[in-house]
Image (cartoon, rainbow, N blue to C red):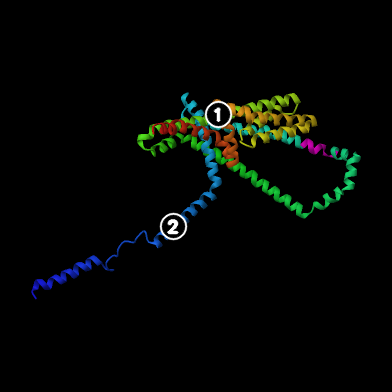
Amino acid sequence: MTAEEETEPAEDATTEAELEGRFGRPGPPIDRRNPFMIGLLGGLGIIVAYAIFLGVRNAASILVLIFIAAFLAIGLNPAVSWLRGRGIPRAGAVAIVALAVLGLLVGGLIALIPPLVTQTNELIRNAPDYLQQLQRNETVNDLVERYDIMEKVTSAVNAGTVGNAVGGVVGGAKLLFGTIFNTLTVLVLTIYFMAAFDRMRESAFSLVPASRRARVRLLTDEILTKVGAYMVGALAIAVLAGFSSFVLAMVLGLAYPFALAVVVAVFDLIPQIGATLGAIIVSLVGFASSLTAGIVCVIFFIIYQQAENYLIYPNVMRRSVKVSDVAAVVAALLGVALFGVIGALVAIPMVAGIQLIIREVVVPSQENR
């Protein structure tokens, strides 16, 4: 055997050792179609999806507040743009709009508190007279004796009842402070969104392909304009409800007619339940004044709410947002049924946006096929 033949096996062994490395030759890549790998990746996907679900569920309340704040910022942006067109810097325009909204809320609270306190004090002050009148009534005394009402009331007032009442008071305090916290959070987020509205919109447009960016920008701006028009329409409806309540209070001679009108207007801005809450407050003031006034208030608000829901609201939305009467009513009903207050808040602008996309995107695409 020659020297060259002796060196070749040595070189081959060295090369093989270098390829194998310190821990041996690497094996073939793992087959991704292996049943074990498919099951493992599927299980990891389910775990990640469930973790995302838990995160969204736990943060649902905060996400709702963020969504409401963003919607309000979009609706108030036309007012900010109008002020900027008058030469006011964006920071000043945002501050003016925010102070106007805050003043509206504070005015509603100030208008609500005096009638509530006054009527409550009158009820407490007149409570002994009411009890004496009931005791003088033979029919009432006969019912009390026949059904042992006093004994049942006395037995009901025990430690458990008092404890439940205290728990209800604590729960009411938590609800009150929670409502205040949520309101302040929405206000602060709305101010931030209004201040950064242009930057956020441009950042969103930068994610769209450049070939379609101009068209997407035009469609988005039109949808945002419809949201602002919806806010203006809702404000007009609220003002009309407040004016109608003011006329009713003046005719019936109720106390604090202007305050009641402000309360009705502010509550009417709340979707789904706002108009009913305002009607209840005015009706209670009417019953505190006289039985006839209370009945008239109830009848008036029943008729007015039907007219507002099926006549005034659809017509205003048709003129401002350009949504048909049927679409406005159906969208409001479906929004309330599916998503509650949030659904009622975004139903009309969402229908307007869907109609715009169908008319400008879907229909032309179908015509070109």
What residue would you read off at disc 1? 324
Amino acid type of the residue that numbered disc 1 sits on in the rendered structure: Ser
Residue reaching furthest to the bottom: 1
Q: Residues within 10 Å of mark 1 (few under 14, many from 20)?
A: some
Magenta residues, dominant SS class:
helix
Q: In which quarter of the image is residue 126?
A: top right
Q: What is the magenta range?
A: 121-128
Residue at (44, 37) in percent of width and height = 200
Q: Distance between the residues labelled 2 and 1?
A: 47 Å
Report x, y in % for residue 71.
52, 36
Report x, y in % for residue 20.
25, 67
Quarter of the rendering occupied by the C terminus:
top left
Q: Which of 129 and 67 is in front in this view?
A: 67
What residue would you read off at disc 2? 42
Residue at (66, 46) in percent of width and height = 173
Q: How many marks?
A: 2
Amino acid type of the residue that numbered disc 2 sits on in the rendered structure: Gly
277 relative to 248, above or below: below
Report x, y in % for residue 10.
16, 71
Q: Is mark 1 on a helix, strand or loop?
A: loop
Quarter of the rendering occupied by the N terminus:
bottom left
Residue at (73, 49) in percent of width and height = 165
Q: What element carries label 2?
A: helix
The answer to whether one can see residue 126 in this image is: yes
